[in-house]
């Protein structure tokens, strides 16, 4: 079972490592759904981490429709990050119709491989999720981080299960969005091999970078140990 903690600070990275998460997704500006982490945060995380780090590359907040200059920024970030000892890269790009821009994605995948490759929650606004998933399989993505195109992964469970079934082990479907210590077991018992969460305490008034909470991580890890999952995706 892979518990991936979304970390936007070095304190979150330390907590994810100490309390036995299996992987880190590193980003910054988590209150705005994450952007590419700063060079200093990335370097600090690499020095500290004893578990795999997947790095989010997102040049700005807002939508996932990028112009030529922004695509070049993404490409430049890929080149920089690929030279570092990281496990993988997390990206997501759409066109103005909320479809997958196949040629752009193929080029980015060619640049990123053989690193691990995740398509992030841009998937949650893509048209025709099953068809789009199959395209991502063809292009060469390893996983899709998704809430099942709902406000939270719990609400999107039906779609998540359909995606997992139709993926048939060709790509990992990793639920993310509103997952916490109280609802994580839903995904474990339904056979998902990976989940994604920030493990932050719910404080709506807190607009600063949240810190992954040790108690939440420990409870999620403890819950995961009660369930067995398949060896495949």
Image: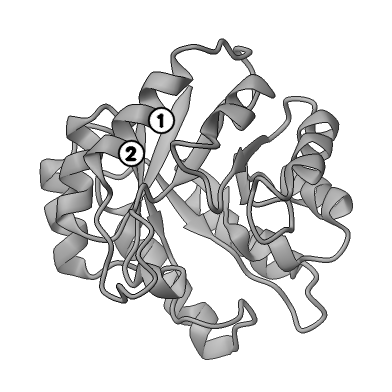
Q: Decide: is 166 above or below 74.
A: above
Give the residue at x 54% y 83%. Answer: 62
- At which x and y percent is residue 210? 28, 62
Q: Secondary structure at mark 1?
A: helix
Residue 216, labelled with which disc?
2
Identify which residue, 68 or 178, lies in the foreground: 178
- At which x and y percent is residue 183? 55, 37
Q: Is residue 52 visible?
A: no
Identify which residue, 44 or 75, lies in the foreground: 44
Give the residue at x 81% y 45%. Answer: 159
Quarter of the image for residue 151 reads bottom right
Give the residue at x 16% y 43%. Answer: 14
Q: With 151 as the anchor, is 90 left or right in this view?
A: left
Q: Secondary structure at mark 2?
A: helix
Residue 220, labelled with which disc?
1
Q: With 70 as the anchor, is 210 left or right in this view?
A: left
- At which x and y percent is residue 40? 14, 66
Q: With 137 as the anchor, is 129 left or right in this view?
A: right
Label 2 packing within 10 angstroms: few (<14), some (14-19), many (20+): some
Identify which residue, 100 or 12, lies in the foreground: 12
Q: Is residue 72 visible?
A: yes
Q: Decide: is 80 above or below 180.
A: below
């Amino acid at each position: 079972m892979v518990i991936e903690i979304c970390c936007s600070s070095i304190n979150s990275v330390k907590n994810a490592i100490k309390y036995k998460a299996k992987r880190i997704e590193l980003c910054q500006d988590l209150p705005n759904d994450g952007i590419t982490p700063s060079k200093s945060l990335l370097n600090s995380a690499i020095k500290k981490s004893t578990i795999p780090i997947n790095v989010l590359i997102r040049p700005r907040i807002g939508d996932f429709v990028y112009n030529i200059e922004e695509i070049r920024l993404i490409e430049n970030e890929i080149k920089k990050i690929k030279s570092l000892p990281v496990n993988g890269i997390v990206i997501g790009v759409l066109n103005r119709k909320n479809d997958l821009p196949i040629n752009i994605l193929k080029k980015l995948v060619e640049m990123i491989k053989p690193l691990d490759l995740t398509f992030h929650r841009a998937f949650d606004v893509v048209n025709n999720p099953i068809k789009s998933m199959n395209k991502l399989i063809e292009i060469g993505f390893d996983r899709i981080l998704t809430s099942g195109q709902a406000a939270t992964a719990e609400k999107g469970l039906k779609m998540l299960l359909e995606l997992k079934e139709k993926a048939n082990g060709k790509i990992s479907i990793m639920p993310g969005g509103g997952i916490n210590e109280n609802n994580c077991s839903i995904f474990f018992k339904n056979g998902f091999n990976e989940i994604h969460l920030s493990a932050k305490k719910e404080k709506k008034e807190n607009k600063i970078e949240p810190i992954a909470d040790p108690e939440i991580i420990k409870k999620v890890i403890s819950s995961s140990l009660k369930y067995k999952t398949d060896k495949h995706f």
